[in-house]
Structures are given as C-alpha cells and as structure tokens.
Amino acid sequence: MERPLTEHIKNDGTALTLKEYEAVGGYQGLRAALKMTPADVMNTVKDSKLRGRGGAGFPTGLKWSFVPMGDDAPQPKYLVANGDEMEPGTFKDRLLIEGNPHQLIEGMIISAYAIGASMSYIFLRWAYHEAAQRVLVALDEAYKAGYLGENILGSGFSLDMDLHTSVGRYICGEETALLNALEGKRANPRNKPPFPQVSGLFGKPTIVNNVETYCNVPHILAKGAQWYIGLSKSEGGGGTKLYGASGRVKNPAIWELPLGTTLREIIEVHAGGMQDGYKLRGVLPGGASTDFLTPDHFDIKMDFEEVAKAGSRMGTGTVIVLDDKTCPVGMCLNLEQFFAQESCGWCTPCREGLPWTAKILLALEEGRGKPEDIDHLTFQTHYNAPGNTFCALAPGAMEPLQSALKYFREDFDEHIHNHTCKYRH
Amino acid sequence: MAKVIIDNVEYEVPDGKNMLEVCLSLGMDLTYFCWHPAMHSVGACRQCAVIQYRDENDTRGKIVMSCMLDANDGTRISLKDQRGAEFRAGNIEALMINHPHDCPVCDEGGECHLQDMTVMSGHNYRRYRFNKRTHVNQDLGPFIYHEMNRCIQCYRCVRFYNDYAGGKDFGVFASSGRVYFGRSESGTLENEFSGNLVEICPTGVFTDKTLRKHYTRKWDLTSAPSICHQCSVGCNTLASERYGGLRRILSRYNGDVNGYFLCDRGRFGYEYVNDEKRLTKAAQKATADTDAFTTVKNLVASGTKMIGIGSPRASLESNFMLKQLVGEENFYQGIPRHEAQLTETAFNLLRTVGVKTPSLKEVESYDTVFILGEDVTNTAPMIALGLRQAAKNLPREEAYKLRIQKWNDAAIREVVQERTGPFYLATPCSTKLDEIATSKYYGDTDSLLSLSDKIIAAIAGRQGGNDEAWSFAGEVAQALKASKHPLIVSGTGMMSREILLAAAGIARALKAGGSDVGLTFAVPEVNSMGLALIGGKYWDEAVEYVAANKDVTAIVMETNPVYRFGAKQAESFLKNCGKVVMLDSLENESTEYADFVLPAGTFAESTGTVINNEGRAQRFYQVFAPKNEMKSSWAWLDMMAHNSEKWRHFDDIVEDMIAHYPILEKIRDLAPTADSRVGTQKIPRATHRFSGRTAMNANVSVHEPKPPVDEDTPLSYTMEGYHGKAPSKAIPYFWSPGWNSLQSINKYQIEVGGPLHGGNPGIRLIEPDGAEGGDFNASGNGRNAGKTFEVLPAHHIFGGDELSAKSAPLATRIPDTAVSVSTTALEKAGMAGADRLQINYNGDNLSFKIKIDNSLPDNVLMLPKGFNGTQGMLFPFFTDISKEGE
C-alpha cells in the first residue's frame, strides 16, 4: 500500500530538511511541471481526479480552470494554502506541515505555476507554533535553493511565498473569510459569486486549497495521473486520504489510506476498535461539522459520494467517535458552544440561532429542558440550513445536532423528562 | 428589460436590478434590514428571503435572499410561499431575542423599521426564554445617542459611516452574538455625516440626541418640507415642530439633490430656531410702544428716504419685496462688493461657460475630479460626500468587467479595495478629501492661478517646464482629457474671483476638446445665487451712502452687520442711519443699534424660495404658525409696502416677482399654489395619528382654539386634510400603511432609490445659454504689496455659518479661533516654537493662537472665516507676522 504523502515523514517528530526531501524525490514533481505548459499541469491535475481535501471535495483541477488565464488576465494572481485547521477533531494538516513542509511548498509552487500566480500565502492556524517555525525554515531553504523567488529553476516562472499566521478564529478556515482575514479585514465570509478564482485576495484571481490538497500535487506531477487514480478505492476521486480517529478507541491517530477505505476498516483495524468497557454509539465521520453515522453505516466507503448517501459528509476524513458512556446531548452542547462562539456575527441565523441552540442544550444538560425544546432544536436545524445562512458554518454546526436528534432522540427526551443527565456521575 | 415572475405574475423590470429592489419598486411589501437603496446589497440579515423556483414545473423551490438574486429574464420567485414567510418570521424572532422590550421608551418607537418589519413578518410570539445579551453604551458626542442593546447587527451603520462617508473612528468589534458597533472608546463621532446614522439605523441604536432633549414622537410632530439653510447646496429636509419648538431635522429624499443624506451642520444646526434670544414681537427701542409696527408703517408711508439691506440667507421673495419697498436704486445686497462679485461671477459663469453644472446627485456620476481651491467638506459638505462616491467610479468599472452587478456592494468593494480616482486637488493646504486624492498640490492664490494656466496649456497639448507645478498640471490635464466624464469643482471659498474664472477656463478648455465636462461651484450661503439674481448695489456703497446722506431709514433684513462686516464698520453704518428697522430672527450685536425690530421667521416660520449653488430654485414651507408675531420677512415688507394689516398671499408675491424677473418664470411650477387641493383637501402638516390636540393647551384654556389657517400654501397646520401620499413637491412627512419609518420613502419613489412619483422637486433656472463669452485668463500677480503672507479664509463646517453656530449642540464642536501656519514659515520669521502670532489687518494688529499646518505653503496663513475675532474680515489680505505685542 502506497503512502506518498506520509511515507517519508520521520518518526522522531522532526521535519524533513530540504536535503532529506530532495533525497526522497522532493521537487521532482516541480521539475517535471516546469517542463510542461501551465495548461498541461492543470490538465494533469484534472485527470488525476484530485478532489479538495478541506471538506467539500470539489475537483481541484476544475476549480483552477475558473482562473482567468492569458495576457489580459488581471494581475497579480494569488495562491493560498488553507492551513487554518480548526475543525474540532481534525489534525491531519498539522502532521503534513510539521512532518514535511517542503511537500506543501512544492505542491503550492506547482499549483501557482498552473494558474499563473505570482504571490502565495500559507495561512496557518495560530496555535500551530511548531508548524509555523518549520514552514519558515523550509521557505528559507526553498528560496536559497531557487525553488522560490525570481526565475525558479531557470524556468522564467517567479513566485513569492509567505507565511501568515491567523489570529485563531474557526471562520478563518472558510475560504472567503480567510481572504478577508489575509487582507487585514474582519474575517467575515464573502458572498459567492464572484468566486475567489475571479475576485479573491485584494479583488484579484485567487485559488485557495487545503494543505492536504496541495501535498498531493507534487506526486501527481512526478508519477502521473493514472498512477494517482490507481491509489484510490473510490470511484469518485483519486489518491490516498489522511484519515484519523479520535475518541475512546484503542489507537487514536492519523493514517494515510486509499481514498474509499471503509469506515469499519478505519475504526476496527487502524484505530484498533473501542477501548475496553466502551461501546461505540456513533461517529462524526469528518470532523465536528458532519452528521453522525452509526455502526449500521460501517461498511460504506469513506469517500465523498458514499458518506453523502449515508446522510453525512466525509468532511476532513477525521472520525470522532462517540461512546456509550458519553452523553450525546453533552457532546452536541460542547460542539454548539464552539460553533456559537466562532460565528462571525455577519448573518442572522448563525449569529442568533447558534447561541440560542447552545443555550437550549445547556438547559437540557442542566435539567432545565422543556418538552418544546426538541421542536425548537429541530426548528434551528431547518432555520440554519444551507442557503439560509451566508456561509457553511451554521449549516455545518447543525449537522451533528440534526443527526443526534435522529439517532439519539431518546437521550434528549430523557434529559427533559428526568430533568437530569444520566451520564453524569 | 427583463421578464420576472413573482407569485406567478409576470413583470417587466429594468435590467441590472436585484429581486428585492424589483419587489419594492413594484410596491410589494417585503422585509429587509441590511439592504439600503443608496448602499445596496450585502446579504447579511437574511430578512428578504423568498422562494425561488427553477421554472414553472419546479414546485419545491429553495430559499434565496432576494437582495442577492439577479432579476434576470425568467427569474421566478414567490413572496407568498408559506416557507418563505415562515423563514422571514423566524428570522425576525431570532433578531428579537436580544432586542429590549423598550419600544414605549425608545426614541425610535413609532418610526422604527424593526417594528414595521416585525409586524410585517407576522412574528408575535416569543419563544426565547434565556437572558438577553447586554452592551455598554458609548458617549458619541453632542449629536448621536447610542443604545447598543437595541442593535440587530444589520451592519448598515458601519457600511455608511466607514465605506460610504469615509469615517475612520467607528467600526464593528467582536463576533458572534457579541458584535458591537461603535468607537474604540467613547468620544465624539468625527465624521461630518455622522447624523445619517440616525436614519440609516433600522432601529433605535443611533438616535438624534438633539431631538432627545425635547423629544416628540413622529406622529405628534407637525412637519413641513423645508430646505436646509446652512450652506449653498440646498439639501431637502423635513423640519418638525411641537409646542412651538423645532424638534428635529430629517433628510427629505430628493433624487436630484441630497438623496437620503444630510451633513451634520444641516441636521443638527437648527437649535437657533428655539433660542431664547429669538425676537418675538415688533418693538421700538427704549419705548413701550405696543404698536411698533404701525409706527414703522407710518414711517414708511411718510415718504422717508429709505434704503434696504438684503441678505443671502433670506428668500428670493423677501429680497424681492425689500427691493420693491425701497426702490431699485436703494436696494443693497447685504454683502461687500468683493463677496457679491464672487457670487455674481459664479452665477454668470454657470450660464456663459457653456459647461453643464451637475445636480448634487449627478456629481456622484463623474469619473474624474479636479478640485481647485475649494475645501468642499467644510463649505458644501454634501458635495464632498458626492465626490467620495464619484472617486470610486473608475475603479468600479473593473468590477463591472468581471460581471459583478452594480447592486453587489461587498463584491464591488472587494475589487475596488482602497482605490480611488483619478481625483486631483489644488488647494491652499491639505483638506479632508486629500485622503482620496490621486495627487495634490498646495499653493497660494497666485500659484493656484498659475497652475490653472498650466493645466489649460497642457490640455491644449502645450508642454512646459519640469517643475512640480508643470508635472502636476500635466498629470491633471492628461487624466481630465482621458476621462469620459470629468468634473471641475471650485467655489467662492478662497474668496477669489480669479480662481472661479480659472476653474471655468479649465472646464472650457476641456469642452473645446469635446469633453462631457461638468463644472460645480460652491457658493457661500443658502440663497447667495438668489441674491445675485435679484441683484443690487453692494454693502460698501450703502456705507458710503449713509455717510453722505442724513436721515436715511435703513431696513436691514436677515443680516447681522456686526457679524458680517465687523463691529467697526457695522457700528459706523448703523449710527449714520437716521432710523434703523431691523428685520431678523435673533437678537444679536446689531439689533442693539436698531430703532425698530421686526421678528422675522427663520426657515421654520417662513415660506419662500431659495436658489442653490447649481441654480436650482427650491421651495421651503413654514413649519408651524408661531404664537407670536414672527412671520416671513416678505410678509412684513408687503404689509409695509401696502400699509396694510395683512400681507398679500404668497402666490401673489411670487407672480409679482416673476413679472419683474422673467428668468424666474419657471418657479410658478415649483410648488402647488395655495388654493390647490388633493381632491378637495389640503395637505396636513400633522399626521393622522397626531395626539393631544385638545389637551395640549388645556393648562391655559380648556377651549380648543381654532386651528391656524395657512393662506399661503396648500398645507394645513393640523391633521385635517388628505392622508394619502402628498404630491412630491410638498411632502410634509413620509408614511405609508405598515411603513412608519423613513423607509416608507420606497413607496413614494417610481423605483426604489430613484425619482419620486411626480418628479423630484426643484427647478433648475440656470443652464448654459450657448452665448459662450468671456476671458478666463485669470492671473493676479503682484498683489501682495511687499508683504510676506497671503491670509486666506479657512472654512469650518461647525462655526462657519452664523446661525447654525448659535445652536448649542453645534457650538460644542466649534474649534478655537487660531491662525494656521507652517513650521518653516514660523522659523523663517524667527518665531519657531511661538504659540501666538500677530498679523496686521486694515491697520490693526491682531493676535491669534497658532495652529501648525505643515501642508501650508510658507507664504500662506489661514484664519477661520466667521469665527470670534475674524468676523467681518475681507479675505484674502496680505500681512507680515510678528510676535505678539511687537
């Protein structure tokens, strides 16, 4: 089983240096790409069926193709790596950045070449201090080696890259809010259209991709689209995927597995099953903003299509496990308090609806719940549905709640009728 | 045109609109908060949600925000669909969870957009049972009261204050349910347009602090359409009264002039109307004459030698009647020759340059701007607000190229970023508009004139030297020539006729090259243009006349000679007169010298016509019938002229005036005549909900007095009359069923943000007449008579106008009188570090506090015009400087 993204990441917790990265084939993808036309690079990525790893799974090559090309295209164009990994339960980008920063940088250079960007930013979560240090060292190395700056490797292509550490708001991970934050403005999302490919950072054409997405690009260019498709077990996309599991499993961790590995394999084989004395009640398959799945769904493939069919989203592919000794209402409360706090305050349903939701859940947990609260929580899940809100934060926030109401309804009812939470000791 | 389908009915609508605009323009009721017709869509509040269907077979549809939905051919939505209605009601419920239940004690109550929208949405039952979030309020200065707990986070305030008006000291803080709109700390809002927050805010977060001092509900106000009297722009206002006091000023929408907005001088500068120094009855000095006016009439009838002193702050009718009373040759404009000639020059140039003078609204449409000499932010603030919008026009084109619709405000701003221009300024020193300037040039009058010559030369393709002036001139000329739609802005602010001519010369040069150029002049006062039209001799001549002739009776109307001409000159004039009859509204330094005073109405107690800086005649209506002798000056004068107990009807005066001034022919259509009716009814100044009428005066008498009758206008003083929509030329208040706030303006417009049904009021009198003539080469050299400094007038929005400066809230914003000078100029004079300096004016040594302004050229000083210590000064003048006492 090939693990192109993580196979070279060292076990001692240090990052690959430039020399080490080059020794294992680093920057070969870039060299290959620079010999191609930007259009060919874009087509290769399109052919590879690489899909965005940030959660939405949009085909990467297609996204790039909306960037205006040619001499009359607006300049400068920008390329941004979204490393604002603040989705609860998600820690895959951290591994990639800390373990092998050059892989990200190389992926970004190739991608920038494909869309003709001349400036690029790594937008990093504020808490990733170690990652920030390693990126700075790697950028320095890359500049000195001629992979960044003027006339990269004599190709005539020039690119600058800079690190921007966020101030630590979840909404900064929303690509348009990220752009506002990068411009020094409030991190409110923007309406689409216009899409960032047309009017992005500073109103110029911009591509924002997830860190993991970029990390795939060097390998696609080095080994070809067909090889990349072959890595996957999924019909819908190519490559491997970083899956993770957290919660009361025996071996919480991150693994690079073929895209389309089943949920059962991830939980039972890689995570080693539940800790002794705990039973699994459900999982959030792709971070906090995805719907619960139950053991009934364990044989589905963890890819964009099958998880959606099961009523959830693959999201970031990092599974959060709910066991039988943890209160599902309490888990929802924890999540909704997080989302309520992280609402940017721009649109009404999110700004007002999420704190209200969290207050009801707190009331339930504290034994102050009322029978009509269930109806109201259900109302909130509809009120904050996609399209009703300005961005995806609130609909995402509603996903664990709406599915918890579906699968764990009896827990909610018990909280209300017994005026207490039975999971408390 | 596009065909859209709303609830299965097809409508033809203009291209480039969003569906919210379309629905509102079609007269439908749809709830909204964050959208504003002048600031367009951002999609934040989610209140205008509707159901959109793909086509006629789509029965499910989806919720979309109508403000963010293009009105394209085939766009199909429903307002009636229950799911949309439920969403809108639910959204209101969410907005209301933290909103205080303080409507009965909230200043906004009764004209609150949030109240209207709540009722419209159908939300009425509160399910939220938790604590409300609370905020600490800030002291935002003398104009605006802040009550953040009421905020529903529509973001309109910050979008107006920062993005539209260029404010810097306001913002949005925190996130989630804690979002806070205010300053980083308590303090006076600095922007000149802060008062618009009162109208922009859909609820009671920002309310009018001056109204709060004498609060009255909207429905209890008696209001009339008025014209702001605080500068030459003539913004349309709604002035409102109760219990004989003026309570507040609001913007009265006029799509050709001020649109939705006003400046703070116009909005908050009205308190002089309520001043305790108001003259209330005709009086004779040092007598207990109970019938002073009869004495005045007898004096007039006796055939005494009379002269009249007119005023640029009095209406056309009043100036006309004064001129009629005293005779053509005895009428003097109440301004010095130098100042009068400035306005006359501006007036004539509007006709003879052959270049269009845009309306204030049209100012916003130009793409390249050159300002010569004028500090419009302070002399005509609303022009500055218009120019701020114009400065974004060319950068916006980039967004349109990306097929971003004009209504998509946030997306456009994203493309535009901070880019402005081309926008050029050539002024004596830095002004507030510098911050949006592409490039700027500072100089004394002569350098600005010489610069103008260079610009004209460069427009004609001639090259000059390599100095700063030539390179600036080249840049400006190139930008102006490249523009499809350039605008030249100047005015009387520098008190230089040559500057006006130079600006006209630049416009003419562009016009000669086929450019669609516009030319805008700011002039000093509300009716400066009207006074120029009426014409008359100058103040200086009046001074000479009374010095040479004994026993002249001077009728001094709505002008305060001490303020305008300085104590020395005013005193000698007034003392030389045989008798002085002073017609004014406030007791002042000059009324001391009057033998008779007649209480003139301010704009609030008068009806009249004024002409603004673009030559637009506009009518203002008396707001209320005062319970004393105050009346329009023209009414006093008419009674004097005809030795009558009653004045002729206003319409007769207007007809009389038209007969004398054919150019005024068109003002016959300016407003409905006094005998016109809507159906059979007058237009009521009071709303149909007006309360307390039988109780208001019960402490005096339980008998309800007969309501006063307005014989001069088609408006009634009470609630009696037609309660449908008033004709656009005489709208006393905006109201429509279900729309109690100012947002009801939507219902008065042909399309939202567009002209009013029945046309925007006001009639332009001056258009280029094709007779292009005149020499615009304007160079004035060697005027400095060997003196080092040219002293130019600095203008200040607060304090630069006599009457508004007497309004308490404004008075607190007036800076101290100080002379502006650069550090290097001080150093050259050997006065580095001095905090006062002395100048020589007309032989007097005057000492002023120093205010350092290093943008000033080393040979220019600036003194605030019309301030304590500078009243009556004739600018510009030349001086040397010295230390105090030397």
Image (cartoon, coloured by chain):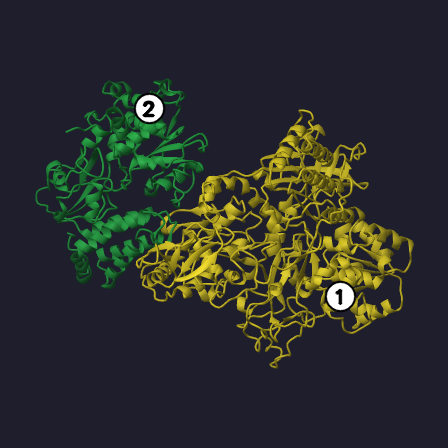
Chain colours: A green, B yellow
In whole angstroms, how far apart are the C-alphas of marks 1 and 2?
A: 83 Å
Viewer-side residue, A320 vs A325: A320
Please state the chain letter of the residue tagged with numbered disc 1 in the rendered image. Answer: B
Q: Residue at x 39, y 25 (%)?
A: A159
**Residue B830 position (above or below residue B26):** above
**Residue B23 position (above or below residue B194):** below
List x then y, in percent, for residue A183. 42, 37
Give the residue pinned by disc 2. A36
Return the residue found at the far left.
A276
Q: Is residue B751 left or right of residue A341?
A: right
List x then y, in percent, for residue A367. 21, 59
Residues at discs 1 and 2 both on one chain: no
Residue B655 image label: 1
Viewer-side residue, B320 vs B484: B484
Q: Quadrant of residue B674?
A: bottom right
Please state the chain letter of the residue tagged with numbered disc 2 in the rendered image. Answer: A
Viewer-side residue, B310 vs B403: B403
Viewer-side residue, A237 vs B607: A237
Would you call the spot at circle 2 few (<14 residues within 10 Å), some (14-19), or many (20 or more)?
some
**Residue B736 position (above or below residue B257):** below
Q: Is residue B78 left or right of residue A279?
A: right
Q: Secondary structure at mark 1?
A: helix
Residue type pointed to by label 2: Met
Residue B562 image label: none
**Circle 1 or circle 2, nearest the eye:** 2
Residue type pointed to by label 1: Glu
> Looking at the figure, which quarter contains the N terminus of chain A?
top left
Q: Secondary structure at mark 2?
A: loop
List x then y, in percent, for residue B688. 54, 73
Q: Residue at x 51, y 48 (%)?
A: B161
